[in-house]
Amino acid sequence: MSNRRRQLIALGVTLAVLAPLGYLWATSLVPNDYSATDMGYADYGGGPAGGHEHHHGGTSVADLTGPKTGTPDVDVTLTARKTKFQLASGEAMDGYTLNGTSPGPLIRAKVGDLVQVTLVNDNIPDGATLHWHGIDVPNAEDGVAGVTQDAVPIGQKHVYRFTADEAGTYWYHSHQVSSEEVRGGLFGTIVIAPEQPGEVIAAIHTYDGKRTINGRTGTQQVDLPVGTKARVRVINTDNAILRVGLLGTPYKVVAVDGRDLNGPTPVTAAFPLAAGARADLEAVVPAGGMRLVAGSSTLSLGIGANAPTGELPGETVDLLSYGTPAPLGIDPAKADRKFEYRIGRRPGFLDGMPGLWWTINGHKFPDVPMFMVAEGDVVRMTISNTSGQAHPMHLHGHHAVVLSRNGVAATGAPWWVDTLEVGDDETYEIAFLADNPGVWMDHCHNLPHASEGLMTHLMYEGVSTPYRIGGPAQNEPE
């Protein structure tokens, strides 16, 4: 065979390999300026498609605000900074603060209060927002850069106003470049309930490998008198599930994700707290005290005198059967729309970068399904995961009730969630009422996973957004 023939064959083989790779690379590129409503393809869940051609008309997200008038009952200004700071336990950090601290200030409101929070960006180059995690606020107040607002640039401010409708434990955090800003400390807690003598707040966060409770490493102490009924509000602000629980006395899991559980019973097992999720643990302080343990005894909070030490038991509370049943208020058997949310993973390109990328229903971001609903729909969704890793799935603006796991029906108290841990090879069925119009993110709250494409949206008919992902505001909602 001549050298020329060999060269032509080699060239042909090279082109046969490179041409498909070049096509895959080119088709993976994400535009620098696009609308969330133009992403992917519409999935109507078996419901009507009428009224969904709404990308540039209908009701604007910007008009779906909280109360525009009225004197706020709670009025807070939070100034966000990128800075060096010290944790409450003294360790030096390089990250983000709100009003000079991380976690940021606790915001407290009562049910029915009008809450107003003004976010000021002092010096964060990428901009910032505030998302009210677990609070089903009106869409314009949701704090998602490029979807419900523009990121707040340096020297500017943004005002959020909403009514505190549901008592519970929540938290707030940036939803602009959130995989970096939240990890670096741009978050805080919000409680909708009057302060009680036995209340203990425990926000768990890892700064640069240092896991903390309320910004403190190691062990700490809260003094509560013997016989006090304590309500321990535990918030997991990290990216992975964490086993938490009380040592020294049986306790009840009285609320999850801001919703009370019906008929909770005493347990001694650990509680699996998903990333982004919250759990309220209740117990009467015994003579020997009790201790909240977050993961292991190296991070704990003693409550009462002489709190015991030790590790959490191996058993785990299973909310599928915990508590007693109660009416749901919706009928999932008569769902108006039924969706599948299949999480997978495959090699390829994402925005020109090679790697192993998350998929939704077999598609890589941004060519993902957009779940289309109408106000008043009862929605049923099956979330399955074969990706090789667990994912804490977070739907903004709504709470969903868990119907089953791996085909086993829920038999306990109605388990309402805004953040649901879906383990590898697990399948959950959930249901919710579409009662909060807007364009809502539905994503993994392991925030690096969201930045790697594990996010899509729930979209209501007749709603559009004037905001752009990327664009002049450089919005990166992840």
Image: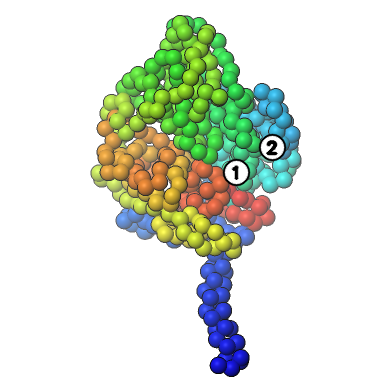
Check the image and name the residue furthest to the front. 1
Q: Position of residue 254 (x, y in %)?
A: 39, 23
In front here: 356 or 110?
A: 356
Q: Is residue 218 visible?
A: yes
Name which residue lies at 43% across and 54% down.
344
Q: Which mark is residue 178?
A: 1
Residue 393 falls left or right of residue 209: left
In the displayed structure, 477 sits above or below 354; it is above
The amino acid type found where label 1 is placed reads Ser
Q: Position of residue 109 (x, y in %)?
A: 53, 24
SS of the residue at dot 1? helix
Q: Position of residue 438 (x, y in %)?
A: 47, 47
Check the image and name the residue furthest to the left. 333
Characterize the local packing of mark 1: few (<14), some (14-19) or many (20 or more) Cα atoms within 10 angstroms: many
Position of the N terminus by quadrant: bottom right
In front here: 369 or 205?
A: 205
Between the residue at mark 2 and the residue at mark 1, the CA separation in whole angstroms equals: 12 Å
Q: Nearer the viewer, mark 2 or mark 1?
A: 2
Characterize the local packing of mark 2: few (<14), some (14-19) or many (20 or more) Cα atoms within 10 angstroms: many
Instruction: Identify the residue position indicated by label 2 in the image.
Output: 95
The amino acid type found where label 2 is placed reads Gly
Q: Which mark is residue 354?
A: none
In front here: 358 or 476?
A: 358
Q: Is residue 170 visible?
A: no
Residue 316 falls left or right of residue 207: left
Name which residue lies at 54% across and 59% down.
355
Name which residue lies at 42% across and 40% down.
421
**Mark closest to the chain's N terminus, 2 or 1:** 2
Q: Position of residue 296 (x, y in %)?
A: 51, 26
